[in-house]
Image (cartoon, helix red, strand yellow):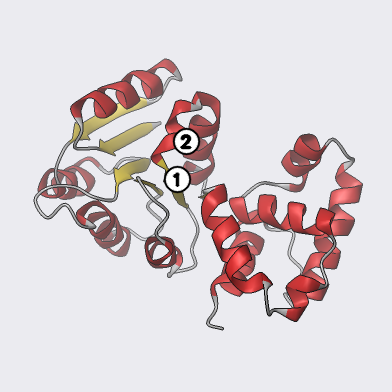
């Protein structure tokens, strides 16, 4: 699997290259600026892009905007965005086309090698990998005065959070140490209570949940 990596901090960029290569990824390019990223994505056509939101020369959202332009030119290009802080606007922009193959992680997550690599693989396969802190903020923002969310049991809220991160029923069952059948029942109840269409497609159900959580009050 070929990766284009964009990170302006040398030590972090070098560490990510070494980590990804240790897990048998091929680094097609490791760049440090927006213009370099744009050229690499256009010329190398990687299987997935791992991109820091803030890159030179603007140090604002240069990396994210380069990735979004590349996805418009090559629909479905898998993109995993890394950010220092939770920025819900960035998550919304990334998810806007509703096509999946996207991820948004805080940089702290890269220190958990297995979690980070799992996110890269999930995004490369067309799935969705959202940082737990993004999901928690969306949940807490809506929970106070949103009656459907208030109807969820504590266990259903746990399942909802993991579902919104992009995890399958089997993965959720493993983490919560329950049967997959129990999780299927919880997810059905969640969709019913949130008035969302039931779906067995992992990516579509994640996007549906995130759209619900992030809609205007």
Q: CA distance from mark 1 to mark 2?
A: 7 Å
- Looking at the rendered structure, the secondary structure element under dot 2 is helix
In percent of width and height, residue 184 lies at 85, 54
* Image quadrant in which you'd find residue 191: bottom right
Q: As displayed, is residue 145 above or below residue 187?
A: below
Residue density around tag 1, few if under 14, some if 14–19, many if 20 or more, within 10 Å: many
Work out which residue is located at the far bottom of the displayed protein and give it: 217
In percent of width and height, residue 4 lies at 28, 37
Residue located at (67% from left, 54% from top): 161
Q: Which residue does the numbered mark 2 point to in the structure image?
A: 109
Residue located at (23% from left, 46% from top): 41
The answer, for residue 128, to whether it is visible in the render is no
Q: Is residue 191 left or right of residue 21?
A: right
Name the foreground residue: 140 vs 118: 140
Image label count: 2
Q: Which mark is residue 105?
A: 1
Residue density around tag 2, few if under 14, some if 14–19, many if 20 or more, within 10 Å: some
Work out which residue is located at the far front of the displayed protein and give it: 144
Residue located at (20% from left, 55% from top): 62
Please report contact status of discs 1 and 2: CB closer than 8 Å, yes or no: yes
Q: As displayed, is residue 12 above or below residue 215?
A: above
């Amino acid at each position: 699997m070929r990766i284009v990596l964009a990170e302006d901090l040398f030590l972090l960029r070098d560490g990510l290259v070494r980590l990804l290569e240790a897990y048998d990824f091929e680094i097609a390019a490791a760049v440090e600026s927006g213009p370099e990223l744009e050229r690499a994505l256009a010329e190398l056509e990687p299987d997935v892009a791992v991109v820091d939101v803030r890159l030179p020369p603007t140090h604002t959202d240069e990396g994210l905007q380069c990735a979004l332009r590349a996805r418009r030119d090559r629909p479905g290009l898998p993109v995993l965005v890394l950010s220092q802080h939770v920025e819900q606007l960035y998550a919304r922009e990334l998810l806007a086309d509703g096509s999946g193959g996207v991820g948004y992680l805080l940089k702290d997550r890269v220190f958990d090698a297995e979690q980070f690599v799992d996110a890269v693989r999930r995004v490369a396969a067309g799935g969705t990998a959202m940082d737990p802190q993004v999901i928690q903020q969306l949940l807490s923002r809506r929970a106070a005065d949103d009656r459907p969310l208030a109807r969820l049991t504590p266990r259903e809220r746990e399942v909802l959070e993991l579902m919104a991160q992009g995890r399958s029923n089997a993965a959720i069952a493993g983490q919560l140490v329950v049967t997959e059948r129990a999780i299927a029942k919880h997810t059905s109840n969640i969709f019913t209570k949130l008035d969302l269409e039931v779906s067995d497609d992992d990516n579509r159900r994640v996007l549906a949940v995130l759209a619900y959580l992030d809609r205007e009050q």
